[in-house]
Image: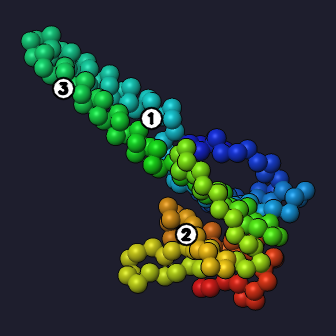
Amino acid sequence: MRGYNWRLDDFDLGRRKRCSSVVVAWKNPEQPLERILARGNFSLGAGGLVGLLAALGAVTLVLAGVLAWQGFWPVLLIAIVQIVLVTRILIKAWERAWISELIEIGPERIAITQQRYRRKDRIELETPWAVVELQQPEVAWYAPRLRLRSGSRKLELGAFLTVEEKRELADLLRSAIRKHSALEGASNF
């Protein structure tokens, strides 16, 4: 599985349960941790982005070069500025779509590593008091919010996922947390 975020830590997958293309769950039989990886659905890798930008630049410079050869030289300058701006915009959009959440559920702690391109944040919650909440929106066409709550701390998960993927992630979280939960009925529908 080598996609745009293949540089995430290489874990020994052990027994892996593939749920959908963007939500993957696995458990290593030698460790008590269960892991769930949710990642953005972004199909353009770094090589594809470079190829797209190279093709765009080549076509633009060839057309601008032909016009510059005929005496319309300002077109070449405008084409170069356009290539620089479009390249910058596409690279920034590509970086913003690079997102993933790795959730490691153990008997004592839930460790959530949220990665957006190069920035990584790690949050830990207590497993025995964790509750999974899938809040339905007040407006019918909005997507529900998936929250993980432990004590007074709340964390929204999977904001980048579709409705079906959020439900799938909620089910995986509930089944993994239920084994270690001190609360009866540790899920809020």
Q: x, y (%) of residue 65?
A: 21, 15
Reading the chain from its start, which is encountered first: label 2 or label 3?
3
Query: Closer to the N terminus: mark 1 or mark 2?
Result: 1
Q: Residue furthest front?
A: 152
Percent position of residue 20, x then y: 62, 60
Whether residue 62 is situated above or below residue 16 in the rendered picture: above
Q: Residues within 10 Å of mark 3 (few under 14, many from 20)?
A: few
Q: Which mark is residue 156?
A: 2
Q: Residue at x 80, y 48 (%)?
A: 12
Residue 125 appears at what percent x and percent y?
69, 69
Could one spot residue 91 in this view of the protein?
A: yes
Q: Which mark is residue 117?
A: none
Q: Disc 1 or disc 2, which is closer to the eye?
A: 2
Residue that carries the numbered disc 1 in the rendered image: 49
Q: Position of residue 154 (x, y in %)?
A: 59, 74
Q: Which residue is mark 3?
A: 78
Judged from this view, the residue extending furthest toward the right is 30
In the image, what residue type sits under mark 1?
Leu
Residue 178 seen in this snapshot: no
Residue at figure coordinates x 76%, y 48% from the top left: 11
Is disc 3 placed on a helix, strand or loop?
A: helix
Q: Amino acid at mark 3?
A: Ile
Q: Residue at x 56, y 73 (%)?
A: 146
Give the SS element for disc 2: strand
State the CA–CA distance, disc 1 to disc 2: 30 Å
**In the rendered structure, which amino acid carries the disc numbered 2?**
Glu
Q: Is residue 29 left or right of residue 81?
A: right
- Camera-near label (3 vs 1) is 3
At a point 62% along the width and 85% down the height, the residue shown is: 188
